[in-house]
Amino acid sequence: MRNSSPLATLALVLAISLASISSHAAGDNTLEVFSWWTAGGEAAALDALFNVYKKQNPGIEIINAAVAGGGGSAARPVLQTRLAGNNPPDTWQTHPGLELMDQYVDPGYCEPVTELYKSNDWENAFPKELVVNLMTKDRKIYAVLAGVHRGNVLWYNTKLLEKNGIKVGDKMSFDEFFADCEKLKAAGIPALGVGDSGIWASAELFENTLLGVLGPKGWSDLYAGAMQWDDPKVKEAIKLFARMLDYANPDHFALSWDQAIKALMEGKVAFSSMGDWADGEFVAGHLKEKEDFGWVNHPGTDGSFIVVADGFALAKNAPHKEAALAWLKTVGSKEAQEAFSPLKGSIPARTDVDRSKFDLYHQWSMDSFSKDKLVASCVQGEAAPAAFRQALNDAVTAFIADRNIDNFANTLVEAAKESQLKK
Ligand code: GAL
């Protein structure tokens, strides 16, 4: 400032003070939304929610605080640090069940949103088994669901399968799947696309396979402690998981989940077992259902629906509480639910939406949700505490390297004890 004139100095001072006034003003009219939705389909769907919100709440500026990394593997630690440091975003993405209750509600980070359910007449609009069983404590509800993903879907590249003489029916068994894998292997094609640079994607492949062997009854026995993690059936699932890994793309550690789906879209791999956020990638890539890509239950899991629901919670002492309440009202509105899920791959959490607005995949998933057995996901934080989920991820990482079935099972027996999964 050595050479500046008094006038220039005055202008600079004015500019600085005006900037601070306007940033203060903007600060009051903002809403900070935290999530991990940054992949193509995820970002498009989040944007659709933002657009409905902006229409319903003109003048409020949204701060998109998304942290990249599928399954929230990078976002959740950032969120924990912010919550522990009393610096919460106004609202954040969370899975109902133990993730919401253990990590956020019990430590006192959330404000209940029960009033919204009353004032918007939502009590009958959302499935009770999700709201009451997974999001309520002491008769207070703690989140609003945006959508419900199905975790156990096997996606495939239709043209690549046709070229290799493979036809997929309405259901898929393990034997059928491995027979297809062998054909593809003989043609030099990695049958299974995996992107486990965040290890959860392989843990999800295991979780889906485990359900395929145990069925929904065995699943609830396992998580209720009535079956142990070294049960012969669990070991059978670990064996099948290892067999599947033998058909995976060699570069799986280098890819994220959405890069693995991209490999499927490009015909580099044939199948991918992934929750139906994958459908968001097909939609974003303008692929045609059936013609370009298809889907079927993950082997053995026909009749079951692994629920991976996405909700938003309200921060206690939210910096912009009114704007955050308005956000949750938008998320739960019919308009937002109908705008979000077609792009995200989930089905709306509300059961009163217009089905004709949804494509074939969504209708298939809606049917499955209404008639199949619903089970909660461990990999996505609903069925088990965070410590067990982490132990499962670590055990999967170790197993990929050593393929030791007993080690895998015994580690999980110990982890279940330590994290107090009921015995
Ligand atoms: C899940 C989440 C989905 C999807 C997926 C991949 O945890 O529920 O909405 O975003 O991660 O990032």
Image (cartoon, helix red, strand yellow):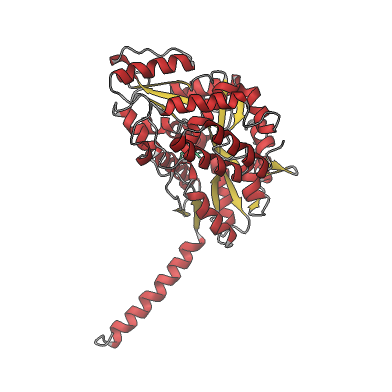
- Residue at image point 46% right, 47% down: 54
Q: Is residue 101 left or right of residue 31?
A: right
Image quarter of residue 190: top left
Total labels drawn? 0
- Residue at image point 52% right, 19% down: 300
- Residue at image point 52% right, 49% down: 76
Task: Evaluate whether residue 124 shows in this view.
Answer: no
In front here: 303 or 28? 303
Image quarter of residue 100: top right
Q: Does 283 sit above or below residue 76?
A: above
**Residue at the far left in the pictured view:** 3
The C terminus - image quarter:
top right
Q: Does 264 sit above or below residue 313?
A: above
Q: Does 314 sit above or below residue 375?
A: below
**Residue at the far right in the pictured view:** 138
Q: What percent of the width, then of the height, locates residue 206?
A: 51, 30
Image quarter of residue 120: top right
The N terminus - image quarter:
bottom left
Q: What percent of the width, then of the height, locates residue 402?
A: 46, 36
Task: Evaluate whether residue 276 shows in this view.
Answer: yes
Q: What percent of the width, then of the height, locates residue 320?
A: 56, 58
Q: Does 399 sit above or below residue 171?
A: below
Q: Is residue 7 left or right of residue 106?
A: left
In front here: 193 or 396? 396
In front here: 155 or 133? 155
Q: What percent of the width, then of the height, locates residue 158?
A: 34, 19
